[in-house]
Image: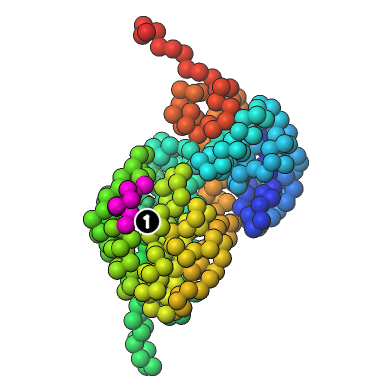
Amino acid sequence: ITIGVVAESGEGERRVALVPKMVQRLTRRGARVVVASGAGAGAHLSDDDYTEAGATIGEPYDADVVVGVAPPSDAEIARLREGTILAGFLAPLSDQNRISALEKAGVIAFAMESIPRISRAQAMDALSSQANVAGYRAVLLAAQHLARFFPMLTTAAGTVKPAKALVLGAGVAGLQALATAKRLGAQATGYDVRPEVADQVRSVGAQWLDLGIEAVGEGGYARELTEEERAEQQRKLTEAITGFDVVITTALVPGRAAPKLVSAEAVRGMRPGSVVIDLAGETGGNCELTEPGQVTTAHDVTIVSPLNLPAEMPDHASELYARNIVELLELIIDTDGRLTLDAGDEIIAKSCVAGNDKLSQPEPASGTE
Ligand code: NAD
C-alpha cells in the first residue's frame, strides 16, 4: 500500500500531515510513503529528512491513501483518483459542498473532526492536539498585545499587580490557555456551560466562574443555548468581564455559529489597554466586535482574531497531528499492509464522511432478525 503526503497549499499553512518519525512506523507495516517535495519545509523538515526515514519524494496524489492537514481545494480534489482514501481535516459540518465533491470523485474520505471522542480514539484526536497548540499560543498573543505585565512583580521601582485573565470555554484549548496564563503569572479564571469542567479548571490552578447556566450536549460537547439563556449569559458575562485585563474566548458548538459571549458593551467596560483574543473567528467569533483574521481596536481594547494558530507553531503541531494520523492509519491498515475498512468499527464508521458505501459491512449477526 502507498501513502501520499501532500504539500499544504493554504495561505500560511505551515503544518505537514506526517513527520519522518511517523514515516518509519508506517514503513514497518509494509507501507510505502511518498512525500511531495517540500511538504515539510514549513515545519522545518527537509526532503532529506523524509528520505532518510524511508520515504520517497514524489507525487502524493497517486497513492492509495492520501493524507493532509487542511481540507483540499477543488483543484486538489480533482487530482484524487476514484477509490483513493483521504484523511485530514475536512470541515464536514461547515462545508457540505466539499464533502459532496469528494463523494462525486469516488474518494473514501476520513475527517479528523468526526473521529468520536471515545477513549479508544484519544490518540487520534486531532481536534484536541491542535486545540492544545491554539490555547497555548492564544496566551502568548495576549501577553504580546497587553499593555501590562502578566505576572506580579515586586521591584525597586514599585509593585506591579498580576494581570487578570478570563477564559471563556474551558474545553481543550481553554484549559491549555488557563494553564499557560497561570504559568506566565496571571490570575486565571475559567468559564463554561458544561459544569463538569469546573474541577478541570481548578486543577490547573484557575478559578471557576459560575453563572448558573448549564448546556450539556451530545458526545461531550456543549449544546446551543436557548434565546433566553443566551440573553442571560450575555448580561452576566458583560458584568463579569469588566474586571479582566485579558479575555480569551474558545467557545464552540459543533456545526453552529460561535456563540456571542462578549458584547460590545462588555468590551467598552474593559480597562483601556486590555486585550480580547477570540479563537472562534472561523465560525464568526465569540466577541461581537471581532473581525475574523484581523487585529482591531475598539474602546481602546485590542481585539485579536487569529484564524489558524496551530499553523504558527508548525513543528510541534505537525508532530502531534502526524501521531493522530498514524493512529488512524493503523486502524485502517492491518499489520500485513492491507486495508481494513470495517464499517462495524465505530471510529471508522463515524469518521468516514464520503464514500461510506465502499466500507466493508460487518457480517450480519446470525440468529437475529
Ligand atoms: P469545543 O472546541 O467544541 O468547545 C470549546 C468549549 O466551549 C467547550 O468546553 C464548550 O463546552 C464551550 N462552550 C460552548 N458553548 C459555550 C457557551 N455558550 N458558553 C460557554 N462555553 C461554551 O470543545 P473541545 O475543546 O473540543 O472539547 C469538548 C469536550 O470533549 C471536552 O469535555 C473535552 O474534555 C472532551 N474531550 C474528550 C475526549 C475523549 O474522551 N477522548 C477527547 C477530547 C476532548
Please state which of residues 119 and 197 is positioned toward the viewer in this rendering: 197
Looking at the image, which residue is at 36% across and 8% down?
368
Q: Position of residue 79 (x, y in %)?
A: 73, 36
* Residue 123 visible at all: yes
219 sits to left or right of 311: left
The answer to whether the residue bearing label 1 lies less than 8 angstroms from the nearest atom of ligand 1 is: yes
Please state which of residues 36 and 243 is positioned toward the viewer in this rendering: 243
116 sits to left or right of 42: left
Q: Quadrant of residue 208?
A: bottom left
Question: For the stretch drawn in magenta, what is the main secondary structure?
Answer: helix
Looking at the image, which residue is at 63% across and 33% down?
102
192 sits to left or right of 318: left
Q: Position of residue 164 (x, y in %)?
A: 34, 73
Q: Which residue type does callout 1 highlight?
A: Gly
Residue identified by numbered label 1: 169
Please state which of residues 108 and 272 is positioned toward the viewer in this rendering: 272
Judging from the image, what secondary structure is the residue with disc 1 in? loop
Question: 68 above or below 234?
Answer: above
Looking at the image, which residue is at 54% across and 19% down?
360
Q: Position of residue 294 (x, y in %)?
A: 56, 65
Mark 1 surroundings: few (<14), some (14-19) or many (≥20) residues within 10 A: many
Looking at the image, which residue is at 47% across and 37% down?
115
| Quadrant that contains the C terminus | top left
| Quadrant that contains the N terminus | top right
Residue range (magenta): 224-231
Q: Quadrant of residue 231?
A: bottom left
Q: Quadrant of residue 80?
A: top right
Count numbered badges in the picture. Answer: 1
* Residue 27 visible at all: no
